[in-house]
Amino acid sequence: MRVVFVGPPGVGKGTQAQRLAERRGMVKISTGDVLREAVRQGTPLGVRAKAFMDAGSLVPDDLVIGMLSERLAGDDTARGCLLDGFPRTIAQAEALEKMLARRGEALDLVVAFEADHEVIVDRLSGRRSCPRCGKVYHVRFDPSPAGARCGGCGAELVQREDDREATIRRRLKVYEEETAPLLAYYRDRGLLVQVDGTAPIDAVAARVDEALNAPRPA
Ligand code: AMP
């Protein structure tokens, strides 16, 4: 299956993507994670992307589309993949459609996670992530069993630069302006399923599974 997760920052799509990929053995591509790794390694892409990310803006389409197209070319995505955080603009959605069409493929489902913006600010300011393995926690809603360290690999958890309140508000504005139009785009194509991202993590996961299992036109 080829599935896209879309939604405002902090709605829980990364957590759900991580869990769904583990449950179903799907290859997950999180463009935010790929970009953060590029920044960490100081690659040319990372150097160009960093200022946009720190400011809470989107990285320009040509950079992100180029990066995703390289990643999708890997053999491991031939049987399907889960895209978390891509596309984020109509131009990216159109580019994705073309990339898949060239391989005789198409998206099966787009899951849109929704939440009130104040809930999101609360969630993101408590978010902590593992700089080594990428696992994500929340100090109150989903704490690491190892306290300030990652329950998976033991590295010290960090707060992302862009999870500070002013940047979160800027990211929400960018979402409304640039990414929210994707909902109508995918609704028109009959691919959209909307999920309440404020429900408990397991309930959201169950709703995502239900959407993936629902019969779809061939
Ligand atoms: P995320 O971890 O998905 O919240 O992404 C973190 C940051 O990476 C975003 O705020 C953007 O600056 C950048 N980013 C991730 N995915 C994309 C994308 N598809 N298009 C543009 N920028 C992106």
Image (cartoon, rainbow, N blue to C red):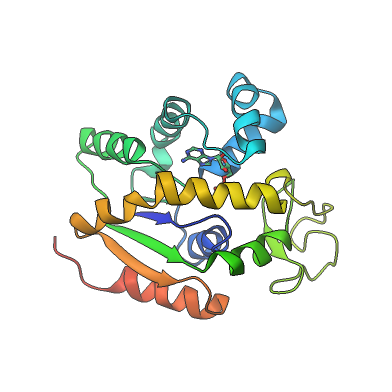
Splitting the image into 4 quarters, where does residue 43 fall? top right
Q: Nearer the viewer, residue 77 or 168?
A: 168
> What residue appears at the point 44 percent right and 64 percent down from the top-left corner?
113
Question: In the displayed structure, would residue 31 be above or below residue 39?
Answer: below
Question: In the displayed structure, would residue 113 be above or below residue 53?
Answer: below
Quarter in which the N terminus is drawn: bottom left
View extreme (top): residue: 44
Horizontal side of residue 107 vs 31, given as left or right: left
Is residue 163 visible in the rendered image? The answer is: no
Where is residue 79 shown, x and y percent of the image?
A: 33, 49
View extreme (left): residue: 218
Horizontal side of residue 155 vs 211, given as left or right: right
Where is residue 86 shown, x and y percent of the image?
A: 43, 45
Where is residue 6 shown, x and y percent of the image?
A: 42, 55
How many numbered discs sit on the rendered protein? Answer: 0
> What residue appears at the point 57 percent right and 38 percent down from the top-left corner?
34
Is residue 177 visible in the rendered image? The answer is: yes
Q: Nearer the viewer, residue 4 or 183?
A: 183
Horizontal side of residue 117 vs 39, given as left or right: left
Q: Nearer the viewer, residue 69 or 199?
A: 199
Splitting the image into 4 quarters, where does residue 26 fall? bottom left
Splitting the image into 4 quarters, where does residue 140 fall? bottom right
Horizontal side of residue 176 vs 127, given as left or right: left
Quarter in which the C terminus is drawn: bottom left
> What residue appears at the point 52 percent right and 32 percent down from the top-left corner?
59
Where is residue 114 shown, x and y percent of the image?
A: 45, 66
**Ligand 1 quadrant in view:** top right
